[in-house]
């Protein structure tokens, strides 16, 4: 049996590919394909976006034909007929189909990937921040106890405050914070630790050149860094004052940063609603939990 397999996770803004040989990572990539943004403008999935997705699949096929494709927020919010049309084309081209993942399962699998190797006696909140949805998973002693789901994400926030994509935004951090605070409402759970998942949060900090600190709370190869809450507040506010063009210039995917300021305000709101003492930035995604499921099935 061919033990190599690929997981392609299609989000509203970013499409992630991870290719494994059992538990060994062979290849990973993050491709910005703005499905939700363009759908909101055009009222349909764009052929150009689908062509970009096909390029991602073509790349994965260089490693393996065992490819599992999962569609998240944007595919949950289009019609069944639209999904069927995309799947018909995918099957014709590759003998593959997109499995549309519920918001509940997206939250569960991402949180599973974040908590699976964590040994921590206390409360943790995992935020899964995406382009079109936001999920919070609450854990006690690394066991999931509660979830809270929202049908908005950074694309919606950035659409509300367009200048967030500019070099220096016209809108202030406090204005965006207040808007998100009202969307989130009350949260009746406190957590010492807020784990940032659902995207490559390390990509922001590294390209913004913000210092990260060793994670001294627990040992996990995917969660090596943490930020004390006072320093996190400083960094999040600073994101609204520094040159975004300068941050983009240090990256290999400049368009990725369109939603970065919205994400900084979103995670900041959550950090204070749960009274977090530390923020743990990661690049953990849904595939980290799905990989365990697929390994068991294969």
Image (spheres, rainbow, N blue to C red):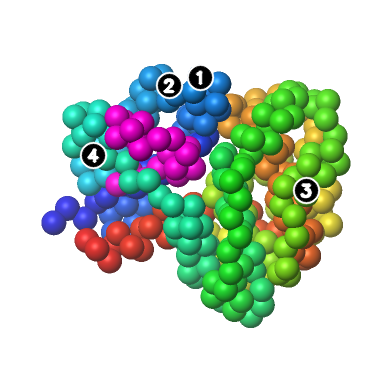
> Magenta region: which residues?
68-86
Q: Which residue is mark 3?
A: 182
Q: Which residue is mark 4?
A: 96
User: Residue 34 location in percent, x, y?
Assistant: 51, 29
At x 73%, y 68%, the residue is 188
Of helix, strand and loop, which one carries label 1? helix
Real-space Cα separation, disc 3 to disc 2, in angstroms: 32 Å
**116 and 22: which one is in front?**
116
Tell me if residue 226 comes above or below residue 12 in the rendering: below
Of helix, strand and loop, which one carries label 2? loop
User: Residue 268 location in percent, x, y?
Assistant: 75, 51
Image quadrant in which the C terminus is located: bottom left
Nearest to viewer (mark 4 / mark 3) = 3
Q: Is residue 71 magenta?
A: yes
Real-space Cα separation, disc 2 to disc 4, in angstroms: 19 Å
User: Residue 294 location in percent, x, y?
Assistant: 30, 59
* Mark 2 or mark 4: whose residue is earlier in sequence: 2
Nearest to viewer (mark 1 / mark 2) = 1
From the viewer's perspective, tell me whether residue 178 is left or right of residue 152: right
Q: Which residue is mark 1?
A: 42
**248 and 183: which one is in front?**
183
Residue 270: which disc?
none
């Amino acid at each position: 049996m061919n033990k190599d397999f690929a997981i392609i996770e299609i989000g509203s803004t970013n499409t992630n590919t991870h290719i494994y040989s059992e538990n060994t990572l062979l290849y990973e990539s993050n491709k910005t394909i703005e499905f939700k943004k363009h759908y909101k403008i055009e009222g349909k999935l764009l052929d150009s976006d689908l062509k970009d997705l096909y390029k991602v699949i073509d790349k994965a096929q260089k490693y393996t034909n065992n490819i599992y494709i999962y569609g998240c927020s944007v595919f949950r919010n289009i019609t069944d007929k639209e999904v069927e049309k995309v799947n018909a084309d995918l099957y014709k081209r590759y003998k593959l189909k997109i499995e549309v993942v519920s918001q509940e399962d997206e939250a569960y699998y991402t949180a599973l990937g974040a908590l699976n190797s964590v040994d921590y006696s206390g409360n943790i909140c995992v935020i899964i921040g995406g382009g079109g949805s936001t999920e919070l998973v609450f854990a006690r002693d690394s066991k999931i106890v509660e979830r809270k789901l929202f049908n908005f994400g950074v694309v919606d926030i950035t659409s509300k405050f367009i200048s967030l994509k500019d070099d220096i935004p016209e809108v202030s951090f406090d204005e965006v914070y207040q808007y998100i605070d009202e969307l989130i409402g009350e949260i009746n759970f406190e957590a010492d630790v807020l784990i940032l998942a659902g995207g490559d949060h390390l990509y922001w900090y590294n390209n913004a050149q913000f210092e990260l600190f060793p994670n001294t709370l627990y040992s996990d190869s995917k969660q090596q860094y943490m930020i004390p809450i006072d320093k996190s507040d400083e960094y999040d506010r600073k994101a609204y004052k520094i040159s975004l063009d300068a941050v983009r210039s240090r990256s290999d995917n400049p368009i990725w940063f369109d939603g970065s300021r919205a994400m900084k305000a979103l995670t900041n709101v959550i950090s204070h609603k749960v009274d977090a003492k530390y923020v743990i930035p990661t690049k953990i995604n849904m595939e980290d939990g799905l990989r365990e499921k697929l390994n068991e099935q294969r």
